[in-house]
Image (cartoon, grey):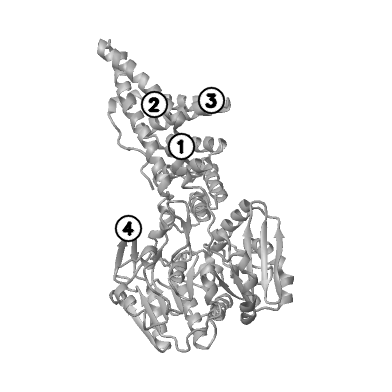
Amino acid sequence: AIDFHDKEPGDLPARLAIAPGEGRALGNLGEAYRHLGQTDHALEQYGQAVALFNQLGARAEEALFLSNIGVLLNDRGQPELAIIFLKASVDVREEIRGNIRGLSTDLQQSFTDTIASDYRLLADLLLQQDRILEAQRVLDLLKVQELDDYLNNIQRTARTESGVEYLEAEQAILARYNTLQTRAITLGQERAQLAAKNARTNLTPNETARLQELIRLEQALAAEFNTFADSEDVAALLDRLSRRTLQQTVGLEELSALRNQLDDLDAALIYPLILDDRLELIITTADTEPLRRTVPVGRVDLNAAITDFRQVLEDPSQDPLPAAQQLYRWLIEPLEADLAAAGVTSLIYAPDSSLRYVPLAALHDGDQWLVEAGYRINHITAASLQELTAQPPTEPRILAGAFADQGTVHTVGESQLRGLYYAGEEVSQLQATLPNLQALFDLAFSVAAVTTELGSVNVLHFATHAVFLAGDPTASFILFGNGEAPTLRDIGTWSLSGIDLVVLSACETGLGGFDNNGEQILGLGYQFQARGAKAVMASLWRVSDPGTHALMTGFYAGLDQGMTKAEALRAAQVALITGQAVTGDDGPEGPVYDHRAGAPPVAREGAATPRAVGYSHPYYWAPFILIGNGL
C-alpha cells in the first residue's frame, strides 16, 4: 500500500482553523459542478477537499472524495486514471476497517454498505482492462469486509491484509498528485493561521499582503488540479498502463501444422480467442482443419465469470458448481460434438489472456467434472510447440527440495514464511518410494545445490513457498530452504534444457501479471519452461499444504506405474475427488477437521490452521496445471 499523503497532524492551531465544514463545503461544491457538467471545476473542489480532510486526519471523508475523483475520471472516459484514485480510496478504507473491528456489527455493516459500490466499480474497471487478478483481489477485500463473512470467521490472508498493489506507473502518478497535495496543505496551513489571527486582531500590512498572496497561490494551485489529469507527464505514464496483446499462445496460422502431432497424441487442441463482443473457440484435431465455434459472450462478461469462478475455487466452503457449469457451457459445450467425433483422450489447451487463470479440469457439465470425463489436459504456449511429442526419459532422476522446518521463518521483503510440515512429508515420502531421488531439506536446499545438479537430473521438485507479486511480477520468487529466494528474473538465467519436468509444489506459480511498462508477462512456471524444461506443473492459487501433499503423492505414484505426466495428474485429481487419495497422519496442526464444517484451509503460506480432510472440493485438486509436454 502507498502512503498517499503526509499523515503528520501538522500545526494544531492550523488544524483547528481548518474546520471539517470547509472540506464538506468544498466537496459539495464539487458535486454541484459535477452535476452541471463542469468536471474541471469539480476535480478542483474534490482535490482541495481531499487535502483538507487528510490534514484533519478525517480518513473516511478523505476516502470518500478520493473515490469521487475516481468516479468522475471514469465518467470522463479516463478509466486507467480512475483506477488509481479508486485504489487510493480502497487503501484508506482498508486502514479504517482495521480500526473498527471492535465496533458493533451494525456499525461495521453500515460502513461496508457505504463502500461496497466503490469496491465493485474498481473491480469492474480492472476487469475491463483484463486485469483479472487485481480485480479478484479487490473483491476478496470486499468479501472480508462483508459482515456475514466476519461472523463466519472467513480466513484472512496476507493478500487481504495488505490492501491493493500499485504498478510502478500508478505509483508515479500518485506521487505527482501527492506533490500537489503537499503544496495545498502547506499553503492551507499558513492561510488558516493568518485567517485565525485576523479573526482575533488586525493583521499587519505585511501579513495582509501575505494572506492575499496565499489566496492567489491557492487559486493557482487549484488551476493545476484542473489540468492534472490531462498533463503530458501523466498522459505518458498512463500510456504505460494501456492494455497490450501478449503473443504467448500458439499462433492461429500454426494450428494446421500441429495436426500430425495431434494424431500421435490422440489429442484435440482447443484455442479460445477472447474478443470484445464474443468468444471464438477454435478446435483442431488430426482429422480436420481448424474449426471455429462462436459463443456470444463479451470479454467483460467472460472476465467477470472467470473472477467469480476463481473466488469460489479458492474457498472450499463455497459451492463451485454454478460458476463451473457456466464456464463449461461457454468453453466446452459448443465443442462436445467435435470432441465426440474425434474420439480423443487428450485436450491440449492454448488459453488466451484471462483464460490462463482457469483450470479446465474444474469445469462441470452438470453431472461430473471435466477431469472425470476421461480427458488428460495440458496447457501449452508457443514455447511448447517443439516439445509436444518428445518422449520422457526412461529413467527419471529426481532432485527434490523441501522447506520443512516449522521452527524456521525466512523473511523475504514483506513476507515472513515458515517451514511447511507437509512439504517435508511430501519429499520424505517420495524419497522412500522412488528410486534415483536425491532429497534436499531446509539448509541443504539451496540455489547452489540445485544448479550444481542440473546437468545430472531430469526432474526437479520444489515443495516450499512461492510468492506472486502482482505489482512487480518479475520480482515474484520461490523460496529455498536456506532462505534464498530466486526471482523470476533470476530463473531467467538458468539452463534447464536437460530437464523433462519441473514440479513447483507451491503457491501461485502459474500466475503472471503486468510489468511496469504495461506488458503482460508470464509467471514462475512459464519461466521454467522458457528456460528449457519440457514440462512444468504450476499452481493457480494459494494451495493447501496437506491437500498438495496428497495430490503430489498420487501424481508420482502414477508416474512410477508408467503413466504419462498428464495421465498421472488426472489420476491424482480423480483420487482426491473420490476420496481415494492418501492423506497421511494428522500432523502437528491438530486433530482431523472436516473442511465442510467451514474450517479454513491450511495454505502453503504458513498459516497455522486445522488440517482438513475430504479433498473433493476443487480448491484442493484443481490448482495445479501441466504446462508443456504431457507425455
As rendered, which of 137 and 588 lies closer to the eye? 137
Determine the CA span between mark 2 and mark 3: 18 Å
Above or below: residue 517 compared with residue 363 = above
Residue 140 percent coordinates (x, y):
50, 54
Tag shown at residue 413: 4
Q: CA distance from mark 3 to mark 4?
A: 45 Å
The amino acid sitting under disc 4 is Gly
Quarter assignment of residue 442: bottom left
Q: Amino acid at mark 1?
A: Leu
Residue 613 locus on image (x, y percent): 50, 73
Q: Where 427 falls versus 152 (above or below)?
A: below
Q: Which residue is mark 2?
A: 221
The answer to whether the residues at label 3 and label 1 have Cβ atoms under 8 Å apart is no
Which residue is labeled 3 in the image?
33
Residue 317 showing in the rendered view? no
Local crowd at mark 3 within 10 Å, few (<14), some, or many (≥20)? some
Quadrant showing the C terminus: bottom right
Give above or below for 582 relative to 405.
Answer: below
Q: Residue at x 56, y 69 (%)?
A: 617
Q: How far apart, in angstroms, are the residues tagged by discs 2 and 1?
A: 18 Å
Instruction: In the rendered structure, find residue 66 and report the number of the disc placed on it.
Output: 1
Tell me the distance, in whole angstroms, between the alpha carbons under discs 3 and 1.
Answer: 16 Å
Where is residue 223 shown, x and y percent of the image? 43, 25
Label 1 neighbour load within 10 Å: few <14, some 14-19, many 20+: many
Amino acid carrying label 2: it is: Leu
Q: Earlier in the sequence, mark 2 or mark 1?
A: 1
- Which secondary structure, mark 2? helix
Q: Is residue 130 left or right of residue 438?
A: right
Give the camera-side residue of 359 and 574. Answer: 359
For the residues labelled 2 and 4, the Cα–Cα distance comes to 38 Å
